[in-house]
Image (cartoon, helix red, strand yellow):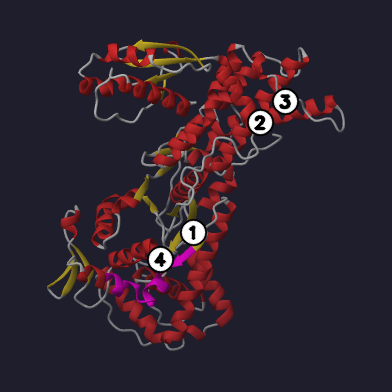
Amino acid sequence: MKRALEALVARAISTLRDRGELDVESVPPVVIERARDPRHGDFACPVALALARAARSNPRELAGRIIAALPAAPDVKATEVAGPGFINFRMADGAFQRTAADIVGSQAPWGRSREFAGKRVQVEFVSVNPTGPLHVGHGRGAACGAAVANLLEAVGWEVEREYYVNDAGRQMDILALSVWLRYLEIVDWPGRPEFPGGGYRGDYIRDVARELAGEHGDRLGRDLPPGAPLPEDDDALLDALIAAARAALGERDYGLVADAVLTGILGGIRDDLARFGVVFDRWFSERELVSSGAVPRALEVLRGRGEAYERDGALWFNAQAHGDEKDRVLVRANGQSTYFASDVAYHLDKFERGFDRVIDVWGADHHGYIARVKGAIRALGLDANAFDVVIVQLASLWRGAERVAMSTRSGEFVTLRDLIDEVGADAARFFYVLRKSDQHLDFDLELAKSRSNENPVYYGQYAHARIASVLRRAREEAGDGNGLDFGHVEHLTERHEIDLLKALSRYPETIESAASACEPHQLAHYLRDVATAFHSFYNAHTILAGEAELKSARLTLAEATRRVISDGLGLLGVDAPATM
């Protein structure tokens, strides 16, 4: 509907220019907006305001001339000049009535588009270090990233969903050390070092250690060297213990311990995400990136383009020249490459795979990293405008008016698995995207579990189940072998019917807007509006009553609503149940 109005206004402006009544060199894009106040009509267009200066004309007078030049359109009931020069449109009921018929008659999900068909985008999200189970904060990134990917597909993008596995570097050594020290406790090995404050804690570490003890007995501690004075500095202590672990185990058994904990924790992450309805097309290993030589190759590209330099024995990226607050180390003086160097290589690899657009979903603590990575992409000679970052803020758990402690000193925390067990995947997925991702989210556990109109996911799912129940009764009344009679939408003239039709008509533009901005909360709020409009319609009118044609029209409206709710919930990763 908005596209049709855009075309009408564009034709009117073209007509005025052809007549010599509008002397402007260029015309800005015609924008059609939903009217904020229904008393002002259904749509508004500000093009006269944008053209007035170039046309040397009063905006209201110019708006009037554009209206006079509009081609005849049966869907437009009235137009008027409003405010400083807006063109307001009031649509005929028939324009909205046909929406229901179009939805029901569509073979493909209605409201989607092929605007970006042939374009490839990669969405990388979650990408949590495999050092423990997913917690509720990670869950918000998973829900947001999955919904963004679904929305992009809904407007035609070919989407690849990727999880970057940080399975190389010092944090993996600390993880392996933590498991090995717990293993030594379990087999009661004499002379074992005390567990350091900087080690990973929690039952998941002990679980892997118990599995190692069950499979290998005390074999993995036999070559433990005699005790030696250990440094007091936390980082130095960890490095000394890692060196001791490597010496005691040898590279083969050290690798066995590291692989055991990585496999165990990563397997748990995969299982939790699968329960959450989040599936990835690719799990990309940092270890494989490093072993492939991708890091030095990326650094050579930077050197060759004059974007990297040496200072104090280290290799630096000229980050300040690309908007960062200071230059960044790529390779330390000891020859070790930094995490940032791996990130540079990883993003080079992404673009070399042929993606037209790359989207990363990051936690709020990575906000300062955006300029750095975007600058590196530009320095590599790539299109930095094709790289976007979606920031996901933290979520706080509440049980009514009481805030839930997220973690303890023992290293235990509220896991995503705990959340799914308590409120279910559907409620968690919907609640996570209720607010814009870069805003803090308060997650009310009691509200998420409630079967009330205040619970937005229940409210939407109940609307779908209510419609499914009506359709089942209608089929029972029609008798075996008789399909439902959808049509006669011209009978939809009551206020609640038109309000619901108008809500349904917004679905295509909602998908387009949510996908363009990578903002799934827009769709969540829209679905709540549709559910509200449907419940109001349902409470005001009996669908399976009245004359046959009116009954048919209302069944069409109900089925159209069911399809939109089902498709919208699906894009958010939420089921649309037929019964509740």
Q: Nearer the viewer, residue 575 or 445?
A: 575
Asked if residue 560 can be seen in this view, the reply is yes
Q: Which residue corresponds to mark 2?
A: 104
Verify CB contact (< 8 Å) between mark 3 and mark 2.
Answer: yes
The numbered dot on residue 133 is 1
Q: Residue furthest left?
A: 312
Magenta stretch bounds: 283-299
Sequence-wise, the earlier of marks 2 and 1 is 2
In 3D space, how far apart are the residues under numbered discs 4 and 3 (Cα atoms)?
54 Å
Q: CA distance from mark 3 to mark 2?
A: 8 Å
- Is label 1 in contact with label 4 (beta carbons under 8 Å)? no
Instruction: Give amino acid for label 3.
Output: Phe
Task: Give the percent coordinates (x, y) of residue 153.
Answer: 51, 47
Q: Which residue is mark 4?
A: 166
Residue 264: x and y, percent? 53, 68
Three-letter amino acid code of the residue under disc 1: Pro
